[in-house]
Amino acid sequence: MGKHVAVVGSGAREHALAAALLRSGKPVRVTVWPGNDGMEGVARGAALPEDPSLASKILSDSEADLVVIGPEKPLMAGLADALRERGIPVVGPNLLAARIEGSKSFAKELMQRVGIPTAEWSRVSGRSGAEELRKRWGFPLVFKADGLAQGKGVAVVKTDLEWEEALSRYFEKKEVPGGETVLLERGLSGPEVSFIVATDGKRFVPFPTARDFKRIHDGDRGPNTGGMGALSPVPGWTPKDQERSCDIIERCLWGLAKGGSPFSGFLYAGLMMTPDGPYVLEFNARMGDPEAQLLFETLGDRALALLEEVAAGSLGRDFTLSPLPRVGVVLASAGYPERPVSGEILEGLPPAGEPLSDGAFYFAGVSREEGVLRSAGGRVLTAVGRGDSLPAAREAAYRLIRRVRLPGGQFRADIALREVGGG
Ligand code: AMP
Ligand code: GLY
């Protein structure tokens, strides 16, 4: 009954991937480990243990022909390495290559070595070193925790007050996750773009460009989140921008391979478009969320073909992806990101499994008991709107999200607003 693909993860990104795989022209069986209760018509496995050798054994016993790892956590635990040791084809980098996301200083050193444009930076161990850099560079300055911090490790500082707060949080209270080592870098400015590719380590296929909206509130205010919405493609993107971004990816892949840690999987460059061209703010070793909910739709019926080629190291030269106008709006629980409220009833959704003409719902933090769908985490779902233009896709996304009722539920009203010429 066709190939059996195991998808590791439980978010809307993994829901969108499962949906894309099920659209594949060929027969395919998809199991999401552990998935969530909003994934209608998709087989689900258990929550996998953190230990990579146990997790890879379970996936191997499930007779998966191919494993796709969604989130960063299992990658940083070495799940891709353990699967490859068992001879199971996998989409996702080994531990050493995943350091491009897991260690900011590793990423910065690599970028310098291979000539990728990135902000000037330095490791700092306390107040006096930081003060010296501040004298040299002035504001804005950016504090970054070296290790994984789930979006909570970065502070952009523009005023004396923010400076004092950051010094205290990073060096005195030491309350920043992943902040055993701290980097200070020069602030850049410009619009941000998510440039994501699928790569087998040698060749790569760029996805259309995307932009995500990280802050909880309209106008990019409030704390950072996992992502409150996204759009694709980014308006005004030029062939020159594409060329420079591909050059960044090529240099990164070359540098990783040369250092003995070739990268296979999804590579995500978080770019800032400065007057001097794209600068890299960060690399991620995985697909973005919520970018995935938009970008996997551009695969049409070729998701399985792409993933198999990535895993086998046989990515075709002629594999190209064309942009499709898409806007994604995330619905989050009350209290997200600090203290998300669970257990509220979700209403207004279309009957499970009913396809929509102008978009789709991809689920994340939800649970179903006796047929009733409830919130069960921070980000609850992404409504993706489709259209033949960005404004049409945006309208579709908001039509969908406004149907849904969730007590205390939060969504941003300004996703893609500026890009369609409003606000
Ligand atoms: P990162 O996790 O490194 O992508 O940083 C998170 C966010 O902080 C980015 O999406 C930017 O909005 C901001 N940021 C990071 N580095 C810089 C920088 N050098 N200059 C200005 N903003 C930055
Ligand atoms: N959307 C940003 C990320 O996935 O890290």
Image (cartoon, rainbow, N blue to C red):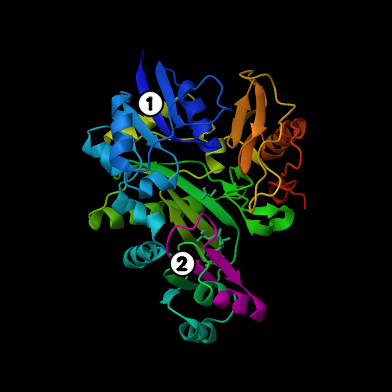
Looking at this view, is 136 or 367 the one in front? 367
- Crowd rating for badge 1 (residues with CA inside 10 Å; few <14, some 14–19, many 20+): many
Looking at this view, is 195 or 371 the one in front? 371
Residue at image mark 1: 5
- Magenta extent: 142-168
Amino acid at dot 2: Gly
Q: Quadrant of residue 47?
A: top left
Indicate yes or no whether the magenta region holds residue 258. Answer: no
Sequence-wise first label, 2 or 1:
1
Amino acid at dot 1: Val
Q: How many marks?
A: 2
Looking at the image, is 71 positioned above or below residue 159? Answer: above
Tell me the number on the disc at residue 276: none
Secondary element under disc 2, as helix, strand or loop, is: loop
Asked whether residue 218 is in view, the answer is yes
Secondary element under disc 1, as helix, strand or loop, is: strand
Answer with left or right where residue 350 lies relative to residue 294: right
Residue 384 horizontal/vertical position (percent): 64, 34
Residue 33 horizontal/vertical position (percent): 43, 31
Residue 385 horizontal/vertical position (percent): 66, 33
